[in-house]
Image (spheres, rainbow, N blue to C red):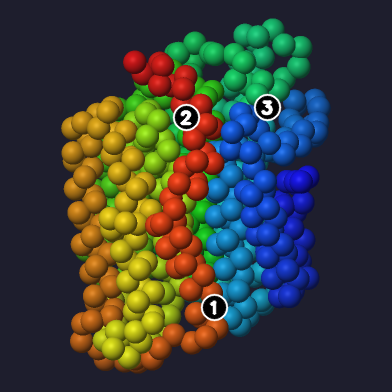
Amino acid sequence: MTIHLSILIALPLAGALFGRYSAITGSVLALAYAIAAVADFDSGASGLQYVTDETWIAQLGIHYKVGLDGLNLILVLLTTVLFTASVFWIIREKVERERLYLGLMGAAHSGVLLALTAQDLALFVIAFDLMLVPFLFITGIWGPVATRAAAITKLFIYTLVGSLLMLAAAIGLAVLVKNQSGAEHLSFAFSDLAKVRLPSSTQNWIFLGFAAAFLVKMPAFPFHGWMPDGYRNMPLPALAVFSAILSKVAAYGFLRVVAPLLPDAMAHFQLLLLLIALASVLYGSAMAFSTTEARLVLGYSSVAQLGFIVLGVFAIQDAGAQGAILQAVNHGLVVAPAFFIVSLLAKRAGGSEDIRDMGGLALRAPILAGLFLIVAFANLAMPGSSNFVGEFMILLGLFQAEPAIAIIASIGVVMAAVYSLRLFIRAMHNRVGPDAESREIGLTNALILVPLVGIILVLAFYPQLPLKKGEKAVTGSIAAAKESAR
């Protein structure tokens, strides 16, 4: 089967330009195309598959080079699944200026797919920045009037600083590789950059530029200053994919860019990044437990979960890196339906997203309560869930690298149970809030939510799918850093 990734990348944007039905068509076709790519993908083969490599800007050595391997394959599928669900959600909401909203979501969808499939560093940097732009407009147009300006200003400033540092690091990396290799032309292709191993001292300062951009976008503590206002003001259909997917592109960047191109720097800064990740786990968990805003419970939970993912990456062990990719998929599948559930709960609580205004839904809405319970159990990494497998592998790799950090990080697993169950119990079993209504989930909402929960259950029974597809690429990406860390 011939898979053309350019078609996959273009479908969401092209479809979203012409209204709701074409937006649905574009997203569904992209999802079908991604499923076909996963089914056709040869797990036993090494290297990239479905590669397109065309010179884009010859003078700058920038190529339009895209491809799939085990690192990005399942993340691409996750992207198409969640953006498609979000498109149906937006149409169900009947928002004002729907065509513009869908157009911006289509642009974001295509931007994320380009960032994930890019095999040229300059192309990756461009896509990494452009995929954020639609969310700035969505927040600025559909966010709360009183506070949205401050939210997008913070988000823009934080990400601009990180992006400028990453741009400088990318240019410096390409120029230094050209000078050291004696190549006639500049090249940003990952395959060309990987041929030259720069001196460790040079790698260190380049690493910091990439790390800053990735840690801000996740966000990780203490680079998360934009997150509370950003999460409060972004409309929930957009926030669901923003939290579930864009943060994973940042974590993915460590494995795609940093590990193979800057292995000595990754080993050099291993302890620093592990400490940042550990702080994110503990801080995010504590804040998720203390806040009463449902969307911020999920926001701070995401800070903690991204901390776990970074712990897996910077354990620089095969089990940890594989667990990080699996957990990136798991968290995306959990947090997106969780935001959808928050929107349903808010509608039953007079529009309030404060958990103190919710409660008492379980008896009159058992289907919604059951779906919510599955999501909550997955979020707290209940044994038997794919999230449990992901966190187990991360901690296994971390114990091999830094046992003390692994022991402390295990506290985050306990805290996840506390804030996940607190959110579920307060919304479903505590006394009813003053304006809360108890009613079952409707058919339209169920058609969006049930398939997402179904995927969570499928991965619980068969987490081997992303592990098997990604094993060679994931272990290969950290091989040089693993050798350097010894």
Give the quadrant of residue 428: bottom left
Name the residue that disc number 2 marks: 475
Image coords of residue 304 (percent x, y):
32, 50
Q: Residue drawn at (22%, 35%), measured in percent from left and top?
A: 405
Earlier residue among tags 2 and 1: 1
The residues bearing labels 2 and 1 have C-alpha atoms spaced at a distance of 38 Å
Q: Residue drawn at (36%, 35%), measured in percent from left and top?
A: 320
Q: Is residue 113 visible?
A: no
Q: Residue drawn at (34%, 60%), measured in percent from left and top?
A: 378
Image coords of residue 422 (percent x, y):
23, 69
- Residue 357, relative to residue 229: is it above or below? below
Do the numbered discs 2 and 3 sit on residues whose CB atoms are within 8 Å? no
Secondary structure found at label 3: loop
Disc 1 marks a residue whose amino acid type is Leu
Name the residue that disc number 1 marks: 447
Disc 3 marks a residue whose amino acid type is Ala
Secondary structure found at label 1: helix
Report crowding for label 3: few under 14, some 14 to 19, many 20 or more residues within 10 A (C-alpha). many
- Quick one: quadrant of the C terminus? top left
The residues bearing labels 2 and 3 have C-alpha atoms spaced at a distance of 21 Å
Name the residue that disc number 3 marks: 189
Q: Is residue 347 visible?
A: yes
Secondary structure found at label 2: helix
Earlier residue among tags 3 and 1: 3
Image coords of residue 462 (percent x, y):
44, 53
